[in-house]
């Protein structure tokens, strides 16, 4: 089965469902309320929260922002790929599967810490 075993894939699928669970909540926010999530997350991090504490909601914010700004809404498989990237692993995707869209969620989450990051596709 390649680099991942079935248990790990199931784990990532469950995590992706936690992101998807925020879908209607994020869709109901105004643009201003959605934008206000960034300082909210930064405040949580300053108070001791970890990136993993906020990752599902932050992924959902980035997902909704992509839908509003570029008209593309990450699919579950793209959420899973982004979770893999956040965990420091490589997510291999074929041409046309949305690598750039996939990485946006992990990039947004990790950028909240204020540290630099690199994306290679």
Image (cartoon, rainbow, N blue to C red):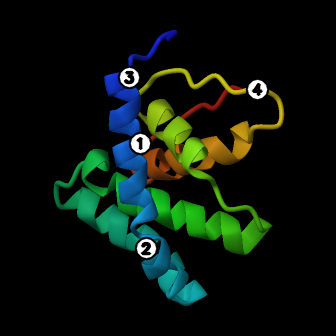
Residue 91 picture quarter? top right
The reply to whether discs 4 and 2 touch (Cβ–Cβ < 8 Å) is no
Q: Earlier in the sequence, mark 3 or mark 2?
A: 3
**Left or right: 78 in relation to 99:** left
Nearer the observer, 72 or 13 = 13
Residue topped by disc 2: 37
Task: Tell me the SS state at disc 3.
Answer: helix
Residue topped by disc 1: 13
Mark 3 crowdedness (10 Å alpha carbons): few <14, some 14-19, many ≥20 = few
Task: Select label 4 or label 3 by which is in front.
Answer: 3
Number of the label disc, if any, that sits on residue 6: 3
Task: Select label 1 or label 4 by which is in front.
Answer: 1
Looking at the picture, how far across and down is residue 16, in whole percent?
A: 43, 49
Looking at the picture, how far across and down is residue 44, in whole percent?
A: 25, 64
Q: Quadrant of the C terminus?
A: top right
The residue drawn where x is 28% and y is 46% is 52
Q: Give the spatial CA distance, label 1 vs label 4.
A: 19 Å
The reply to whether discs 3 and 1 touch (Cβ–Cβ < 8 Å) is no
Residue 118 picture quarter? top right
The reply to whether discs 4 and 3 touch (Cβ–Cβ < 8 Å) is no
The reply to whether discs 3 and 2 touch (Cβ–Cβ < 8 Å) is no
Residue found at the very far top of the displayed protein: 2
In the figure, 4 relative to 68: above or below?
above
Task: Tell me the SS state at disc 4.
Answer: loop
Number of the label disc, if any, that sits on residue 94: 4
């Amino acid at each position: 089965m390649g680099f991942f075993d079935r248990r790990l894939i199931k784990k990532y699928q469950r995590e992706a469902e936690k992101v998807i669970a925020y879908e209607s909540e994020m869709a109901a926010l105004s643009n201003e309320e959605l934008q206000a999530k960034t300082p909210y997350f930064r405040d949580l991090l300053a108070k001791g929260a970890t990136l993993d504490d906020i990752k599902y909601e932050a992924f959902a914010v980035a997902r909704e922002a992509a839908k509003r700004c570029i008209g593309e809404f990450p699919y579950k498989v793209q959420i899973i790929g982004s979770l893999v990237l956040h965990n420091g692993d490589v997510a291999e995707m074929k041409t046309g599967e949305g690598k750039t869209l996939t990485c946006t969620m992990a990039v947004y989450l990790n950028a909240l810490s204020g540290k630099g990051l690199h994306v290679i596709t």
